[in-house]
């Protein structure tokens, strides 16, 4: 999924990075993907704060999560564990209020509610 406002050059760069062609941690991630079926453009919007958030990509993806909280009301996070998906950043353990995907031409179509979710922050910087 790529934002509809991305230029063709930006799309090419994103595909190169996430296919592993540029090396680094994304190359490790790319080895977990069997095949790229296609790339869809859509208006992407998201909002995230302290483990709660949402992401929408046109009519193709719509996800909203809310974090779990401890007895003291603090947001539940994982740090320095295999389940913390981003090094040096907390992983917010959450519940997906709703998780909808409508990519029927690729065979991906579902709607879930109340499933587990993990949200974390990450940043990719180009250091050429």
Image (cartoon, grey):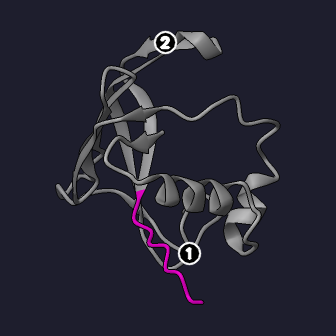
Magenta segment includes 126: yes
Find residue 117 and report its image quarter. Answer: top left
Residue farthest along the bottom direction in this orientation: 128
Q: In the rendered view, would you say 11 is above or below 39?
A: below
- Taking 107 as reference, is 125 left or right? left
Magenta segment includes 6: no
Q: Quadrant of the C terminus?
A: bottom right
Q: In the rendered view, would you say 78 is above or below 94?
A: below
| Count of labels in the image | 2
- Taking 112 as reference, is 84 left or right? right
Residue 87 is labelled as: 1
Q: Which of marks 1 and 2 is in front?
A: 2
**Residue at horizontal 70 percent and vertical 29 percent from the top:** 37
Residue farthest along the front direction in this orientation: 8
Question: Picture coordinates of residue 112 (x, y %)?
Answer: 42, 16
Helix, strand or loop for disc 1:
loop
Q: In the rendered view, would you say 84 is above or below 119?
A: below
Residue 19 is labelled as: none
Magenta span: chief secondary structure: loop
**Residue at horizontal 56 percent and vertical 89 percent from the top:** 127
Q: Which of 41 and 122 is in front in this view?
A: 41
Q: Which of marks 1 and 2 is nearer the N terminus?
A: 1
Question: Picture coordinates of residue 49 (x, y %)?
Answer: 20, 58
Range of residues picked out in magenta: 120-128
Residue 110 is labelled as: 2
**Residue at horizontal 23 percent and vertical 52 percent from the top:** 71
Neighbourhood count class around disc 1 (C-alpha, 10 Å): few under 14, some 14–19, many 20 upward: some
Q: In the rendered view, would you say 64 is above or below 24?
A: above
Label 1 and label 2: CA atoms lie apart by 30 Å
Helix, strand or loop for disc 2:
strand
């Amino acid at each position: 999924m790529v934002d509809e406002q991305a230029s063709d050059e930006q799309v090419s760069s994103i595909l190169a990075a996430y296919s592993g062609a540029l090396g680094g941690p994304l190359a490790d991630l790319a080895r977990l993907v069997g095949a790229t079926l296609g790339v869809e453009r859509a208006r992407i919007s998201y909002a995230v704060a302290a483990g709660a958030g949402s992401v929408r990509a046109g009519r193709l993806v719509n996800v909203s999560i809310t974090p779990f909280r401890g007895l003291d009301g603090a947001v539940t996070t994982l740090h320095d564990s295999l389940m913390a998906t981003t090094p040096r950043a907390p992983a917010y353990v959450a519940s997906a209020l709703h998780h909808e995907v409508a990519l029927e031409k690729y065979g991906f179509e579902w709607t879930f509610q109340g499933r587990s979710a993990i949200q974390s922050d990450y940043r990719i910087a180009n250091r050429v």
